[in-house]
Amino acid sequence: MLFILLLTYLLPSQPIDPYISITNQANTYIEYIKLDTQKDLSFWALNELYSSSCEVNKNVSRAIGQSASSFLQRIFSDFECTTKENEDSLKFERLEYYAIETGSFSTLINILSLTRPKGKLNSTYSKFLDRWQQSLSSDQIQLAEAVKDRNNISLTEINTESKLFILYSLLFSEFVNNYFTADEFTIIITYLNNTQQTDITDFDRSILNFNLVKAAYETNRYILISNKFNELIASELYPHSEKKVGVFSGLDFALSYIGNYSESLYLQRNILIPLSRYYDQKSRTDFVLLQQSANLYNLGKYEDAKQILEDLYNDPNSTIPKSQLYNNLSLCYKQLGQKNEYTQFLLRAIQQAENEKNPDDNFYKVKLGLYQNLFVYYNSIGDSTSAMPYIRKAQNLAELNNDQFELGSIHFYLGDYYLERFNDFDKALIQFNIAQTLFTSSQNYLNNKLLLSKKIELLIEIDSLQEAQKTIQEVKNIASESSDTPQYLEALIFEGNIAVKQNNLDKIQSVIDEIKVYSLEDLEFEVLVRYFNLQATLFYKKSLYREAYVYLKPTLNQIIERAKGSVESETGFWSVKKEYLDSFELMMSILKKLDYTAESIVFLDKLKTINDASLYNNPLLKASKLSEKELAEEKKLIARIQNLRTEYLSADENSKQALKTEIDKLSAQRQLLTNKVIKSSPESDLPIWKVQQQMNTEELILHYTELNNKLYVSSISKQNLDLYIIDITNDIDLALKEAANGLAAGKTSLSSLFKVYNLLRLKNIPEGITQITVIPDNELYRIPLDVLPTKKPNSAHSFGSTNYMIEDYSFKYFTSLKDYLENNRNAQGNLETDFSAFAISYFDDFPETLPSLPFATQEAREIQRVLTSFEDKKVFTGNGATEQAFQAQLNTSKILHVATHSEVSSRDPLFSTIYLKSAESKGTEGNALYAYELFDNQLENDLIMLNSCSSGTGSYLQGTGIMGISRALRYAGAKSLALNLWEVNDKIAADFATNFYAHINQGYSKSDAMRLAKINHIKTGSADPHYWGAYTLIGNSNPIIKKPASSQFVLPLLITVGLLVGFNVRKKSIEKI
């Protein structure tokens, strides 16, 4: 017995063996009964164990038969289990026999709490009283009758030595809510917490813990439940049974609900699944597996989650609805970048759901969710035509079920849809008003609250200030009636925003004074930011610029750090809240007034580096490097840090330092985890002087940041800093888009490009500048500055008669100043292969429809030929261009050239793909290598060139995609990336790449080689920027090999010769006009 009891405190390192555990438990209970130690509790446990299944009772019977207890042998032999159907009745009869024979009051209470016919309970109670009434107190009789009659009971009425067992019987009765009120549950929890501090037996402690879990579960205190996790699973004294499976299922729900995923997974794998399978609970087993896949999904273990779901899907006896499996599988495929499978399975789920006639409310919610998922997906990829039918289907389904709440949510979605997608204020307002009516009728306070805030924001934005004030008053009335201080304060902040629009400083001050009367601790982070923006705006409007700066700076720092932690795992970009952008814009205005140009540029560059956090926040990368426990811990750390940042903003000055210390401590703990994914160091403010120190006198950095319809242009030279702002009006926005779209579509307009040249004030570039480093943003990723004409063209298409910026300047491109500093040094490392090329010309065996690239193979061979200064060169073509070979060469090649299709995803940059062959397939079928898979390699490539890039959704790459793929490859270790911004002719792409590498071979820097290749194309091919301007180099531009001494004057000579050739070509072209 001692050995068994010691085992109860050791966590199983592998799934429990129910057979061994049950035998051990039976022996323990029999020993307790024999020693007259907690005899009543032990008999109940033995009966539970014996009754769990007819298969189990054979093992228990064997243990009873081997005992010396004739009493037990008589009970369990007289009432032997024969079938599952009669077991409940036999279980009751054994309890009844034991209670009447021994006079056990606690067993009587256990019997009376069971779900049995009233007549049967009355009969048992009468038999018990006939024999034992004289030994019962009046309090005991009163308690027994209250239990039997399902009356309310207080904890003080349970005053016996078997209090924990009696409490267990009542808490786990189907009539628990008859017995106890919500207040009584709180009293019970307090009592149990106090009792566990006392000296009680192991068995009582086990029952106490199960009581505590049940009372906490009834009151939704899931954290309290999770705190008992270790004790619950360590104890082997609670009998294995179907009831135990049910209790642990509740524990599992609580663990998942609060994000304790690793503990939940442990419970599922080691206890729930083995027990539910042992008791042949197929539906329970399937449900636990479904929950297990959900836990893995939440941790970013998408591949593992997918495998469980596929097993359930392939199980012909699975009890999980197919539509639910289709939906969950589709989400896994989506997170793994398998877009075709995602839509395929989601559509299958829709079809299955529409065919299944199931009146169950949960099934209705599943169908509704499927329609909404498809609407969100198609909307996210810009396919409004496909999106709208699904939201209409969701609307029809909600109307059919008269679901006012879901209808309100759908109209709320639609309002956001018209606002965010089309900037259609009128349609958005109509949808918001419909949603408001529906939320009010369904009495959904929370959603109505969110909706009203959104509606007020919209009304203020469109200057409908009277209507906004009317809605604000409505919110204030609702908040007052509901004692909802946070909502009331938010309404006051909106009043302040209206006063800002009206430039009413007295009103702003009045609003702020009223807000200061209340505590801000319950406000959400975004609302707090709005409040601090309001106060800083007041300082600014009063010309108190220094005060505004000091007040707003800590808020802005918290926004930046919080934004890094909230980078979307799916897109790799941070969620841009309007409040955050308003803070940045306000700070820029303040810094301009203070003439803090350097700090302005630092803040603007921070915006660009926020998204770098996506690399160590990407769940696929983290899941491959961190354990489940570490993944769960990191999620908890993120949540705690975000909460502390909110507390920090609302805290008084005396508390802020302690909060900051705690934030720093938790951030350091999190960084220890994220360093296992990607090595990083705590970021400090970027010193602009350090950037200038690294520059030469002929270099100019043009740093562009688009923010709230303003383009901030930072100009940095060795000695000077300048910052100016361009308002992006509708006309300017249209001009930028027309120029970019024309370039990409082969409909280049020099007039449009020259308009951009003037818009960006590029004619003001100082004399003596020969090198320009560009850090673009938004549309300027699609319009390389080198394609812009420097003088007014003769016509929109006189490509050969104009001068382009590339002819006057050498260009380098980076994604941020931080990137410029870190990636502008000479590459280190000694790689065994100088050049590796992968080329595929035909894609017939790929699942995707990809056009052929007939010159790709020739291109790779020609580049191999011109690279005479490089010794070790390898070319993989056709079926030899496999993913396996590519992965091998990644780590060993100085230059990696890809002449196959590659797709840069703007929405999911880490799911950008390179199409290669798969050696694992007999037919070497096509395969897609994702960008995130490169992180398993420690890259040291000096250059990766993706020739024949496409966006997957259009004819050109978007800025988000370019920035994303560049960031991904940079963090994987590559020094620079060359790619085409829009699709170009295969033959032209091959010729351009060959010319580019010819100059690399002569020792030119990568940027100079790119420039010379472009100039060569202008002079000898088509001067249309569509054909030569697509190529851009992002990152380190230093030479890959040293230039021979004899060639130091070649560049000026080539340019001079090029100009002479160009003069003749242009002269001839002009003569023909």
Image: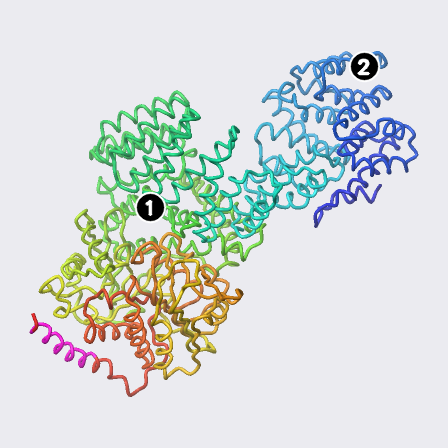
| Residue drawn at (66%, 31%) of the image | 212
Q: Is residue 783 above or below residue 261?
A: below
Q: Which residue is mark 1?
A: 383
Instruction: Give whichever of 236, 1024 is nearer the camera.
Output: 1024
Instruction: Find the magenta span and give its range.
Output: 1055-1071
Which of the two discs, 1 and 2, labels the residue nearer the N terminus?
Answer: 2
Give the image quarter of residue 292. Answer: top right
Residue 160, above or below 726 = above
263 or 276: nearer the eye?
276
Tell me the residue that label 2 is attached to. Answer: 136
| Mark 1 residue element | loop
| Label 2: how many Cα within 10 Å (few below 14, some 14–19, many 20+) | few
Report the residue at 71% width, 42% height from top: 234
Dot 2 falls on a residue whose secondary structure is: loop
Q: Is residue 1008 above or below residue 187?
A: below
The quarter of the picture where the N terminus appears is: top right
Indicate the position of residue 1068 as horizontal and vertical percent values: 10, 76
Indicate whether 88 appears above or below 118: below
Q: Nearer the viewer, residue 792 or 504?
A: 792
Horizontally, is 550 left or right of 253 in the view? Answer: left
Amino acid bearing label 1: Asp
**What is the spatial separation of the Cα atoms under label 1 and label 2, in whole angstroms?**
76 Å
